[in-house]
Amino acid sequence: MFTAQQYRADAIKYAKLVRTANGPNEVREFERLERSFTELADNAQWVTDNRNKIVQSTEHATATLTPDPAAQSTGLVLAFSSNAALSAENCQRLEALANQYAGVELTSDQKQLKRKMVSWYSTHCMHRAAR
């Protein structure tokens, strides 16, 4: 997983590329990438700062998970940044989450969230497996 510093370095790289872009389309794309990597850096920093508040799963977990809603929202932001450049990374994150929480009993809210994530995965990641 990338660190906040690595995401910030990429954001800075795209901010510099804006100054040398060839046309307005390239400027918009570099600005969009800069914003995306800045948001990812902010999210990664939040995870680092709040690691003690995040529910950790064990391989054979049987307890019902009740994560903090803020942690759940941050996880969604990280998993669903709708950025084509990061689509493969988002797919890998969802695959890692599926493995991490395999066998864990979920609440009804978590099951609903899981259905949304599976739907997103089916739409955005299944074409990767077909290649």
Image (spheres, rainbow, N blue to C red):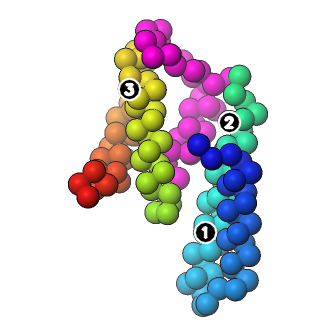
Residue 94, position in %: x, y? Answer: 43, 40
Q: Are marks 2 and 1 in contact (CB under 8 Å)?
A: no
CA separation in Å, label 1 and label 3: 32 Å
Task: Say which residue appears at 63% left-offset and 81% top-offset.
Answer: 27
Q: Earlier in the sequence, mark 2 or mark 1?
A: 1
Give the image location of residue 40, x and y in percent: 64, 51
- Going by the numbered disc 2, the residue's amino acid type is Val
Name the residue located 71 percent from the left edge and 22 percent from the top edge. Answer: 52
Q: Earlier in the sequence, mark 1 or mark 3?
A: 1
Magenta stretch encompasses residue 61: yes
User: Which portion, as a residue range, is magenta?
Assistant: 53-81
Label annotation for residue 47: 2
Q: Residue at x 69, y 63 (%)?
A: 11
Q: In terms of secondary structure, where does tag 2 sit?
A: helix
Q: Is residue 17 magenta?
A: no
Give the labeled residue for mark 3.
111
The amino acid type of the residue labelled 3 equals: Lys
Alpha carbon separation for disc pair 2 and 1: 23 Å
Q: Residue at x 46, y 63 (%)?
A: 84
Task: Indicate which disc residue 61 carries.
Answer: none
Q: Which type of secondary structure does the marked residue at label 1 adopt?
A: helix
Find the distance from the CA under tag 2 to the CA under tag 3.
23 Å
93 vs 35, left or right, is left
Q: Is residue 42 left or right of residue 113?
A: right
Q: Which residue is mark 1?
A: 32
Residue density around tag 1, few if under 14, some if 14–19, many if 20 or more, within 10 Å: some
Vertical order, 19 against 111 (above or below): below
Horizontally, is 32 left or right of 101 in the view?
A: right
- In the picture shown, does residue 129 fall above or below 108? below
